[in-house]
Image (cartoon, rainbow, N blue to C red):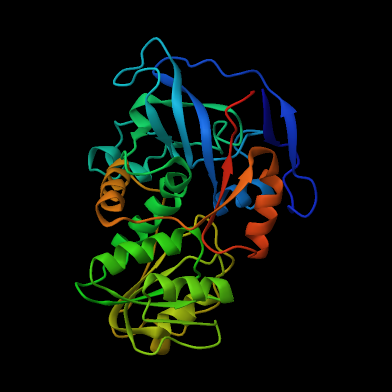
Amino acid sequence: MRAWSVTAPGPVEGDPLRWVERPVPEPAGDELLVRVRACGVCRTDLHVTEGDLPVHRPGVTPGHEVVGVVAALGPDARDFAVGDRVGVAWLRYTDGTCGYCRRGAENLCPASRYTGWDADGGYAPYTTVPAPFAHRLPDALDEVAAAPLLCAGIIGYRALKRAALPAGGRLGLYGFGGSAHLCAQVALAQGARVHVVTRGAAARRLALDLGAASAQDLDRPPPEPLDSAILFAPVGDLVPVALRALDRGGVLSVAGIHLTDVPPLRYESDLFYEKELRSVTSNTREDAREFLALAARHGVRATTHTYPLTGALAALRDLKAGVFDGAAVLVNPDDGA
């Protein structure tokens, strides 16, 4: 099969990804072999490709928002059959025995491993996933629409939980790409007033179309104090900006796996009055199950822009440049591997 490989991590304006020949992987142990039908293009893929995240697996195939069909099972795989439709997400393995796992915080497991970083992901016709970390997808979700839910949606949902938004509260979203536009739909369905701050005109239009109370450029604050905020843009300079927009007792959660350096914070203007700054690390499988159920119940849908599997590098370049609103999805044709 032909697959994308991060052979020389660096700017996507260059040639960090190569379209290479790879054998179809063999599912070992409890793994499923998944025939990829669609794979979302996540900003974390961009960080892996450009080297913002350290190399874990040289030449890795990115992609961790995978929708596909089980093509084969490893000898110890359970609970799935050939032909089942499954989702493959970022979290691929935890040890299940450490103190974090035992207390329900498997996202903090020191032994955790990740699809598209520690193991080859979905920028390929086939990938593998341990069966306990595969997700059954609601029948109501089509393949392209479901793909971005498997990371952008899940991590946005965890960021929303970390932001501790009160019922009917005022939520600010800084950046409005693949994850934020899904998070906004959940928050709106739960009765929040959502204010979006983002540089892209198309993203601002999308925010208003989805029901946001306001959408403005980065040079303008939200029109009212915020109970909670989530920073989706990987820009550390926005941390004090978002903190200053919070009302007393407000919480800012930072959703990204990578963030540029945060400038010095001023205690009186940025953190006083019991404001909180929280990070978000990956997600748990319970987060994924909760979010996928909410997405099906409330009709959460990704705004998607499709690219052929062979167009992965173009999709990453467009993501970095902010060419599209919503999320990009690579579509793998039925014919050929």
> In this orientation, which residue lies closer to the viewer: 139 or 310?
139
Q: Residue furthest right?
A: 14
* Residue 207 position in % (x across, y down): 44, 72
Q: Residue at x 50, y 40 (%)?
A: 64
* Residue 274 position in % (x across, y down): 28, 80
176 sits to left or right of 78: right
> In this orientation, which residue lies closer to the viewer: 100 or 77?
77
Q: Residue furthest left?
A: 167
Q: Residue at x 42, y 45 (%)?
A: 146
121 sits to left or right of 149: right
Image quadrant where residue 84 sits: top left
Q: Quadrant of the N terminus?
A: top right
* Residue 213 position in % (x across, y down): 36, 81
Q: Residue furthest top?
A: 75
Is residue 54 visible in the rendered structure shown here? no
Q: Residue at x 38, y 51 (%)?
A: 154
Q: How many marks?
A: 0
Image quadrant where residue 56 sits: top right
Image quadrant where residue 262 sits: bottom right
Is residue 146 visible in the rendered structure shown here? yes
Q: Is residue 99 above or below residue 240?
A: above
Q: Is residue 226 above or below residue 49?
A: below
* Residue 221 position in % (x across, y down): 46, 87
> In this orientation, which residue lies closer to the viewer: 210 or 264?
210
Q: Residue at x 29, y 45 (%)?
A: 105
Q: Is residue 56 above or below residue 70?
A: below
Q: Quadrant of the C terminus?
A: top right
